[in-house]
Each structure stands twice: as C-alpha cells, then as structure tokens.
Amino acid sequence: MTSSESSPARQRPLDETPALAAQAAALLRNSRALMTLSEDEARQVLPFMRLTTFPKGAALLREGDGSTSSYMLLVLEGDVAVDTGGSPFSTVPISVLGAGDVIGEMALFDGAPRSANCTALSVVQAAGLSRKGLELLVETHPKVAAKLILSLAQRMAERLRALGQQLQMLMELAPPPTE
C-alpha cells in the first residue's frame, strides 16, 4: 500500500485521551464547526466518537467511496486537503481544512458515496462520529443530538449556498455558447 492508500494508524475511544477529548469538546462548541452546543452537551457527544490518527499522505475520505461512508470527522490536529475529480490530472482543489473543521457530514446522514477526496497534508488526528454513534446519541441524549444535527444541517446549507455562488461566478466568466 502507498501512503495515500493507507488506512488510519490507530482508532480508539476518544475519551481514552483526555487532552484530545477536551480539545474535541471545545471544537464542538466553536463557531468554525458551527456547533451550538454547551460545554456539557459537547462532553455528552464525546463517548460516541472515536479518535483516529492518519499519517501524512493518507486518504481520510475518497471520492466515490460508499463502502464505509456513514461517518464524519472533526479535525482535531493537522491539515487536510479537499479536492474533487477522478485523477491526479483532473483534480479540482476545493480547500485546506484544519482543527475545528468537520468533513464527511453529508455521508453521516445519507450513507451515500463520498463527494470529495480528503488527504492528510500532515499527521491528522480526528474525532469520528459514525451513523451508529449518532443513533445511540439520539437514543440517550435526544436534545443534544437534535442540536448537533441542526448545526450540521446549517453547515451543509452554508456550503451548498457557497457552491451555488461559485458556480454562478464560473458561469459569468465562461464565454457564452456559440450556435
């Protein structure tokens, strides 16, 4: 396996690492992740998350992957490149994300194949929340789960609006079709 094809180096319960669990709780409350959770509510989410470490160059998410796509990641440490396109020659860079950013939230809800590639630009530590973890959170802490889901939905809506604006700008820059 090449480093870009490698799987996460380690995965374990997030609450086994108190410093990273505290960091995750703080990031769940910050505006960058668009979460509206109190400190207590953020701490209620932590037992349902798993700490995952990715080496530099590893694929966190792969565009089109649907085999294990029903989870999201909250980046705790490191930088992640996001791009789309089929091959290295036709990729379109989207952004570089870091601590506090959430990736993969659409697939958390619908389990559909990934819509972008996310690659570790450095060693990345992330807190993952699976669909099963979210379902357990709904059962045990329904109000917290509702706030989390609403925050993630707001985040997706903002990304969709931004994409629409980008497409509009591209359409304005493109030459009119000739007949």
Image (spheres, rainbow, N blue to C red):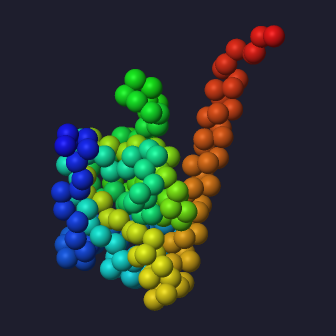
Question: Which residue occupies the foreground of this view, 23 or 13?
Answer: 13
Of the pair 43 and 89, the residue shown nearer to us:
89
Left-right relation of 103 to 54: right
Image coordinates of residue 10 in percent, x first then y, are 19, 62
Residue 31 shows in this picture:
no
Q: Residue at x 60, y 52 (%)?
A: 158
Q: Residue at x 43, y 50 (%)?
A: 65
Residue 64 position, x and y percent, is: 46, 46
Q: Position of residue 125 (x, y in %)?
A: 25, 57
Q: Quadrant of the C terminus?
A: top right
- In the displayed structure, 118 sits above or below 109; it is above
* Quarter occupied by the N terminus: top left
Position of residue 179 relative to residue 28, above or below, is above
Q: In the displayed image of the protein, which residue is found farthest to the right?
A: 179
Give the residue displayed 29% in from the left and 70% down from the top: 50
Whether residue 164 is visible: yes
> Can you say whether 147 is above or below 27 in the image?
below
Name the quadrant containing residue 175: top right
| Residue at figure coordinates x 69%, y 32% from the top left | 168
Residue 118 shown left or right of residue 161 in the figure? left
